[in-house]
Image (cartoon, grey):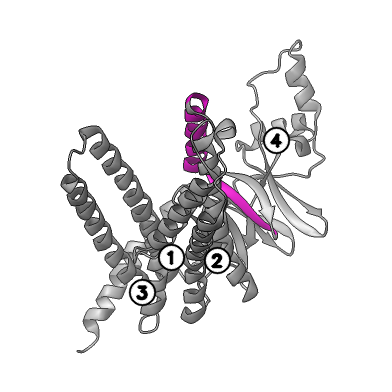
Amino acid sequence: MKSNTSILDIFHIKIELHWTFIMLLLFALLISAYSGLYFFIIILLLFLMVLLHELAHSATALANGIEVKKIILFPLGGASIIDLDEVKPDLSLKIALAGPVMSIFLGLLCGIFAVIAPQIMLTQWLGAQVSIISIFQILFILNILLGIFNILPAFPLDGGRVMKSALERKHDNFTATKIAVKISNIILIIFIIFSIIYELLIPGISFAYFTFVLIWDLIIVMFIYGGAQSELGMAYITKYASNIKARNVASKDYILVNSTMKMKDLYKQILKKGTHTTLFSTFENGKLNTYTVAAKFPVSIPSNYTKQADMLNNTVNNYKVKIPYINYNAPLSKAIEKMRYEGASIMALVKNNKIVGLLNSQHIESIIALHLPLEIQKDKQKSREIPK
């Protein structure tokens, strides 16, 4: 299930909001209903600052000829989906540092505006005793904190990627990732311990405030830990499943149709072949796109069920849902990575602009679960046999 919502495109880069950011915006709106628009405006400004932070990463990548897939925005930062597997450590370091540098720059810029801005009150618009100066002061703090937070050596934050780039000078990508994740886990433990000690030292702190901050810190740690484990998992797949091609795990359990087929004809095909997965492709503006059909079919069609009958007389093109595709000869690790950032559970395999197979996330997980332990065991056995 996709957990992100696409909102706009900038320089052909898709910008998506993670569900946590959407929840934060809804929470801000709820508070604004009682206390004015102040908090909501601050959250919107935070969104803008995080976006500029991520655009700095993306612009640096694009300037160096590296494709940027999309940007996902979180409340505490974002993620620029960039394929860095073949990127040299020096360039990877430059891309990682671009975001924090942008945040620090924006913070200093807001700090200057906070000093020179006129003392104009915005109370009647924001519903709180707020001035232009105080807005810039808050933006100064938010950007500096965003910059500092992202340079923490916790993978996969920007600081963690800087650390990984440094490690790649002496180690391969897999080893560098493993070391970076181990260091990241230690940093997270220190972060939680320091946070608890710091809060306990605050005089007169209430239990409610202590609990709120601790829960918030745990959420931060869970996000970072989850991201690090995801990166580590992909590193294992890239290393130990590099010999598996996407075509090796392809499924033929689908119905291949064209976009003009009637839904009633598709319904008959589903009953006949016993599968509900439908694939078709179209050329749009000279570009291949692959689709599946999203529709709930009834067991039977009553003659008076007009709405359902109308649906069955439509073509499958009316119910198409775009899915990703990849060359049938691509490495399985690349297909898994693409499915992950696309938020897709299925992917079409294409050969000569024709669909020739289907990848299913559940099937892939089963293959990987069986394959990786065997390959890791072989690797350990080889390491024991090498004379020291």
Report if residue 207 is visible in the image: yes
Q: Mark 3 — residue? A: 176
Quarter of the figure with the C terminus: bottom left
Percent position of residue 149, x then y: 38, 59
Q: Give the magenta part as a residue range.
A: 12-34
- Local SS, label 1: helix
**Which is more N-terminal, label 3 or label 1?**
1
Marks 1 and 2: in contact by CB < 8 Å? Answer: yes
The amino acid at mark 3 is: Ala
Give the amino acid at mark 2.
His
Foreground tag (1 vs 3): 1
Q: Give the tally of numbered discs.
A: 4
Q: Which residue is mark 1?
A: 158
Please name the predominant secondary structure of the magenta segment in the image: helix
Q: Select label 4 or label 3 by which is in front.
A: 3
User: Does 346 appear above or below 103?
Assistant: above
Corner quadrant of residue 70 = bottom right
Q: Which secondary structure lies at badge 4?
A: helix
- Helix, strand or loop at mark 2: helix
Q: Is residue 113 magenta?
A: no
Residue 21 part of the magenta-drawn span: yes
Marks 1 and 4 in Cβ contact (< 8 Å): no
Q: Earlier in the sequence, mark 4 or mark 2?
A: 2
Q: Are marks 3 and 2 in contact (CB under 8 Å)?
A: no
